[in-house]
Image (tube, helix red, strand yellow):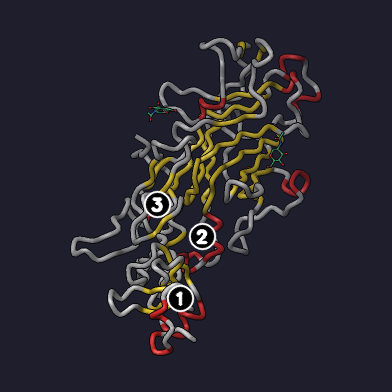
């Protein structure tokens, strides 16, 4: 299925373990997480440009060793010669790839081509690996979205001209937990072979604060993403395009054979599985929440379990949510910080039934009294027996 066995760039998040169960053998609750997967596998990808969409176009590949090969055709209508973006996330064999139009067709800096991959849910990203079918572009960037409605934030810039293209210095290490750095191309590729090179980006390598990941909200947010965007900015043409003819221009284009996203479905330590609910209209995924948590990412407590503040599970505590005491008179409670500080129980029951009131539905509402015959809270106005001070009503 979605799991895959050959992991080339196992990083910090992958190393913690396989998926973990939320209750151990002895029934103790513990931090848990879904298995480590390739979150890109079999996902749809949107590209702002794909070759052959306005009719067949010609491209002239360059071999691994820099030789120009015979020209070929890309035709989005033809099953044999099309290169749609989904070919970056399909099965590896036989190798298929996405491809853009060529420089001849107008794909040239500052025209940028974006590939966007929606993960359908937030994932904790460990690494992203791109495998280029052409030579590695001169400048490209990876962006991510933390929530479905947030802006795109930069993850990493790869460029042989960091300052010129992205206005950033060329760096090896980030100095802040959530800093997207630009690293020069020469650091991660050799000149040959030109094609089929894998470029990895590890989200946590050398990040300040990594040793306290469990207690570091900035890093936790940094690895979390609901969508990934690859922004292809400049091709590596070695200056060729200024001198060559049509064939030279047709030999420059973007092509990616694989996008791999090594990640875990993000459930804040409260689930060991994610799934797509059958009933819902959309195809978005959700966590199967444990520890009395709820929500797409187990980011809150179940309605009746707000006696303590919600917290992400850590390796030292599961931080399971705690049930409120509502004397069977309510179905939900909300967390109240003042109540928590004064009594140690923060759950304030909501909509107490049967004319009850109080944080735990433990007393009768104002202008109500507890009828001695059946113990029910009864309105003073409509029962003459209630007109006694001793029964809690004021005459
Ligand atoms: C890929 O996704 C499609 C639905 O989009 C599904 O029918 C198919 O089974 C999936 N393939 C694998 C190998 O998971
Ligand atoms: C490509 O993505 C970048 C970063 O999100 C964005 O600023 C730019 O407008 C996008 N370009 C296109 C053509 O979609």
Vertical comparison of 342 with 59: above or below:
below
Vertical comparison of 20 with 283: above or below:
below
Q: Secondary structure at mark 2?
A: helix
Name the residue that disc number 1 marks: 365
Residue 175 percent location from the top left of the image: 62, 64
- Closer to the camera, 357 or 146? 357
Q: Residue furthest front?
A: 384
Badge 2 density bin: few <14, some 14–19, many ≥20, Cα 10 Å: some
Give the mark nearest the N terminus, 3 or 1. Answer: 3
Give the mark nearest the N terminus, 2 or 3. Answer: 3
Quarter of the displayed picture in which ligand 1 can be seen: top left
Vertical comparison of 306 with 19: above or below:
below
Give the mark nearest the N terminus, 2 or 1. Answer: 2
Vertical comparison of 338 with 234: above or below:
below
**Quarter of the N terminus within the rendering:** top left
Name the residue that disc number 3 marks: 14
The CA distance from mark 2 to mark 3 is 14 Å
Answer whether residue 313 is visible to the viewer in this image. yes
Residue 31 percent location from the top left of the image: 34, 62
- Closer to the camera, 372 or 387? 387
The CA distance from mark 2 to mark 1 is 44 Å
Residue 152 percent location from the top left of the image: 65, 47
């Amino acid at each position: 299925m979605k799991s895959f066995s050959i992991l080339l760039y196992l990083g910090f998040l992958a190393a913690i373990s396989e998926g973990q169960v939320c209750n151990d053998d002895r029934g103790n609750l513990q931090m848990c997480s879904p298995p480590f997967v390739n979150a890109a596998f079999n996902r749809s990808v949107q590209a702002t440009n794909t070759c052959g969409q306005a009719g067949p176009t010609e491209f002239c590949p360059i071999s691994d060793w820099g030789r120009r090969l015979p020209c070929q055709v890309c035709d989005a209508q033809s099953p044999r010669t099309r290169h749609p973006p989904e070919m970056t996330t399909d099965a590896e064999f036989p190798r298929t790839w996405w491809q853009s139009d060529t420089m001849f067709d107008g794909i040239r800096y500052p025209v940028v081509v974006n590939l966007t991959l929606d993960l359908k849910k937030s994932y904790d990203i460990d690494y992203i690996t791109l495998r280029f079918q052409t030579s590695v572009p001169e400048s490209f960037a990876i962006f991510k979205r933390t929530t479905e409605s947030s802006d795109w934030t930069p993850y990493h810039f790869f460029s042989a001209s960091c300052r010129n293209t992205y206005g950033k210095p060329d760096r090896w290490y980030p100095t802040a937990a959530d800093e997207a750095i630009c690293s020069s191309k020469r650091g991660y590729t050799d000149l040959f072979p030109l094609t089929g090179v894998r470029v990895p980006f590890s989200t946590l390598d050398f990040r300040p604060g990594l040793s306290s990941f469990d207690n570091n909200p900035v890093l936790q947010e940094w690895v979390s993403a609901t969508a990934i965007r690859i922004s292809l900015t400049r091709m590596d043409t070695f200056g060729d395009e200024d001198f060559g003819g049509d064939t030279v221009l047709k030999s420059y284009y973007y092509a990616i054979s694989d996008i791999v996203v090594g990640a875990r479905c993000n459930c804040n330590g409260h689930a060991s599985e994610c799934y797509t609910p059958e009933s819902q209209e959309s195809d978005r995924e959700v966590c199967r929440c444990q520890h009395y948590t709820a929500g797409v990412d187990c980011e809150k407590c179940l309605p009746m379990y707000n006696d303590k503040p919600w917290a992400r599970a850590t390796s030292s505590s599961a931080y399971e949510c705690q049930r409120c005491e509502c004397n069977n008179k309510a179905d939900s409670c909300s967390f109240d910080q003042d109540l928590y500080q004064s009594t140690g129980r923060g759950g304030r029951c909501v909509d107490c039934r049967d004319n009850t009131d109080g944080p735990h539905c433990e007393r009768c509402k104002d202008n109500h009294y507890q009828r001695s015959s059946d113990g029910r809270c009864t309105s003073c106005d409509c029962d003459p027996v209630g007109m006694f001070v001793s029964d809690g009503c004021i005459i």
